[in-house]
Amino acid sequence: MLSFAMLSKLVSTKKEKSPPCEICGQPPLSVTAVATLRSSLSAMEANASKCLMCSVLSAGVKGYLSRTSFPLTTVVEDMTVLGSRGGSRASAVEIWLMGTTIKISFFCSEKSLWMWHNVPFLPTGNEVPGTTYSNESFIWATQQINHCRDTHQNCNSYSISATLPKRVVFVGTAAEPTLRLYESQGERDPYICLSYCWGQRDFLRTRVDNFESHKTYIEPHHLPPTLSDAISHTRRLGVRYIWIDSLCIIQDSLLDWREEAGKMASIFHNSFLVLSATGSSDAYGGLYASFPSDFTTFALRVDTNTNEVFSCDVSDVQTTTNATETIYVRRALSHAHSGDSNRYANDLPLLPTLRRGWIFQERFLSPRVLHFGPQELYFECREWSSCQCSFMEDYEQMNTWTWFGDDFLSHGFIHQETPKTYYDPSVWREMDHEGIIYVWHRLVSDYTKLHLTFEKDLFPAISGLAREMGTVRAVLHAGAGKAQETGYYAGLWKDSLVRDLCWKVDYDKTILSSEANDDGRHKTWMDRPHEWRAPTWSWGSVNGPVKFLGQRYGRRDFFKPRCEVLNVSCTPAGSDEMGEIIRGKLVLRGKLVPAKVMPFPERFATPFPWQVLSLDLGVRAEHYVHNVTVDDGCQDLLRLLDEVEAGAGGDQPIVYCFFLGLMTSEGYHPVFLLLKRVQGQSEEEMGQHTYRRFGRLLLTPRPLRPGQRLRFGERYEIFELAKEEVVTII
C-alpha cells in the first residue's frame, strides 16, 4: 500500500540509478515525469543482445502487430518509448506508434526477485474481464464503493446529511417496480447522479407537456441506452434514486432550467455516487462495453539464462520457473485520469465525457465516480483511485500539503496521477496562498481545453468549483485578517489579480475541439466568442486554452507585481455572481509604454499566437528578446498594416504595453499587457484612457558576454519611455 507520504518521499529522494539505454531509454531516470525517447524497431532489434529491455520491447511490438491487421512497416521505424519509474501506477513502460493512437503497454502479474533486479520499474497489472457488465466487473466496482464508503471520512462528509434534490428518478424496487419522476419532500436518502454526453440525436426528456405523466410513469423502453443502463445499474446497487438532468429538469422551461441548473454543482457534490458514461459519445452509446479484440493481452517468455524473448498466448503460459519469467503485453487502455501528463498524450483522444466542459466540475465536486470506459471500469474518489487493469493502490490522503515545496513539482505529480484528489477542496484548504493560486491556474488551464456546446456557459459550468475556491480563499484571508481581499471577477481573483492577468492563449492543434458550437461555428483560437461573455482582461474572452505565467516551472514568489489595482467590477447576468456576466471593468495604475505594431516576418495561414505580430518598442533590442503572444487573430491591426504596406497612407498602428510586474526566475523578466485604445466612442462616454487587451508581452534578457554587467535600467531601456498612467480595461 502506497501512501501520499510515501509518494512525497519518492518525489524528493534521489538514488543512484543505472544510466538509461541510448536506444530504448530504459530504465527511465525521472521519478515523477514521463521520460520519452524516439526510437525504432530495427534499432531495438539490433541492440537486443546488449539490452534486455530492447529485446523485450521489440518482441512486444512484433507480437502485438502480428496479432492485428495493422500494417507493420508504416509505424515501426518511428516509435516513442514512454517510461516512468515511480513506485505506483506512475510506473509505466509503453511504446507509442507515432502517427497513430496506439500505445503498447508492458506489465507483470507480480514482482519476482528477478523482476526486482532486472526490471524494477515494470508495473504490475491484471487481466480485464470481457465486459464491464459482467458479474466480475460488478463485484469489483462494489468493492471499490464499499471500501470508500467504509474507510474514507472525507468522501462521506457531505452526502451523509444531504437531502434529495428537488426531483429525482425513482428507479423502482421489487415491491414497487414502476419507474417515475419523484418530487422530493426534503427527505434524506442516498442518490446517484449520471454524467454523460447528450449528443446530437433527440431522446426522451422531461418537457412541459409530459412533466405530469412522468411523475406517474416513465416508459423504460423509450429511454436511450445510456439512461436505461444507468437506471438498471442504480437498481443493481440497491439505491432507489438517480438524478439525470434530462429527466429531472423541465427542458423547455427556461425558468425551471435556470433554477435547477444553478443547483447542479451542489447536486453532484452531495450525491452518493456518480455513474459516468465515460466511453460513450452520446446518450445512445450505453454504459457498458465489451473488451475489444485488439486489446487482448499476450505474453512474453524471457529465458533468464540467455535473455532470449519469445511471445505466446496467455493460455499457453506455464508457471514461472527459475529459468523463465513472464512479461505481459497489450494495447494500453484508456484511463480516466490520463490527460496532458506529457506532450505525447495530447495527441491521443480523450474519452468522450472528459472532453466536455460541464462534466469537468461534475467529476471533481462529486465524492466518488465510477467511470464506464471503453475497455474497463475506473473508480476515483476524493482520497484514492483504481482501475480494473491495475492492482489497487490506496493513495491515502496523508498530509498532502506538507510536500508542496518551494517549486511545484509535486503539484504536477499528483495532478497527473490523482486529479480528483488534486482538485478536491478539502486539499485546497490545507494549502497556503501560493499553492491556492497555482492550483486555480492549473484548473483553468485544464478547463479551457474542453468543449462547451453553448459559449455562454463558460462561467456557469465552473461556478461550483469557483464557489469552493472562494470559500477556501475567504477562510485563508480571514485567518490572516484580510477577509476583504477575497472576490471573484470573470474567472480571476482579487487577492491574486495581477498574477491572474498574466495568462496567455496556449494554442495547440491537438487540444482544440473540432466540434461545432450550437450555431455551427467551429472553435478556433483566432476568433473571439460569437457573443460577448467576458471583458478582454479575462481568460473568458478568448476561445482557446490558456496557460498562466510560471505554470510549468514556477517557484514560490517568482512574480513581483509592479502595478496597482484601483478598481475591478463585474455585473452578473443573474443572481449567481460566479455565473454569466454582462459587463466588466478593470482600473489599474502603472507604467505604460507605447509601441508600433510590426508585421511578423512571415505570414501563416493558421499561425500560432506568437506568429501574428511583432512590436517596435523604440529602443535598442539587443539586450532582450520580446515574446509577443496575442489573444486572437488581430485582424484589425493586420488590416491597418496591410494598408500601410500598400501605400494607402497612414502610419503604423500604435498599441500600448502596460507593465504588470517582474518574473524573477533566472533574472528579471518584465511582463506586460498589450492594450489597444478603444476607438469609435467619445472620451466623455468611455474615458480618455480606456483600452481592450489583445495579448501579453514577456521580455527575456539575452545572455551577457563574459564579464559584462548591466544595470536593470540599461538592460531594459524600454522603461525610459514609460509614463505613469491610470488605465481602464474593458
Image: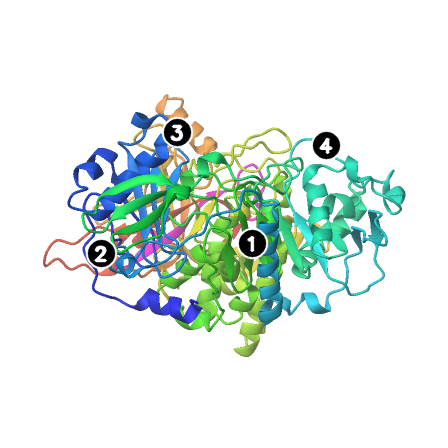
Read off the residue under disc 2.
714
Q: Residues within 10 Å of mark 2 (few under 14, many from 20)?
A: few
Up-down: is 72 above or below 535?
A: above
**For residue 16, what is the image quadrant?**
bottom left
Q: Given the image, on which type of amino acid does mark 3 rest?
A: Leu
Q: Residues within 10 Å of mark 4 (few under 14, many from 20)?
A: few
**For residue 105, what is the image quadrant?**
top left
Front tag of 4 and 1: 4
**Is residue 323 on the magenta stretch?**
no
How far apart marks 2 and 4 lie (CA) works out to: 65 Å
Which of the marked residues, 1 or 2, is nearer the chain's N terminus? 1
Front tag of 1 and 2: 1
Relative image position of residue 501 (x, y in whole percent): 47, 54
Read off the residue under disc 4.
202
Could you say which disc has been placed on residue 251 in the image?
none
**For residue 477, what is the image quadrant?**
bottom right
Q: How is the image coloured?
A: rainbow
- Identified at 57% across, 67% down, the residue is 486
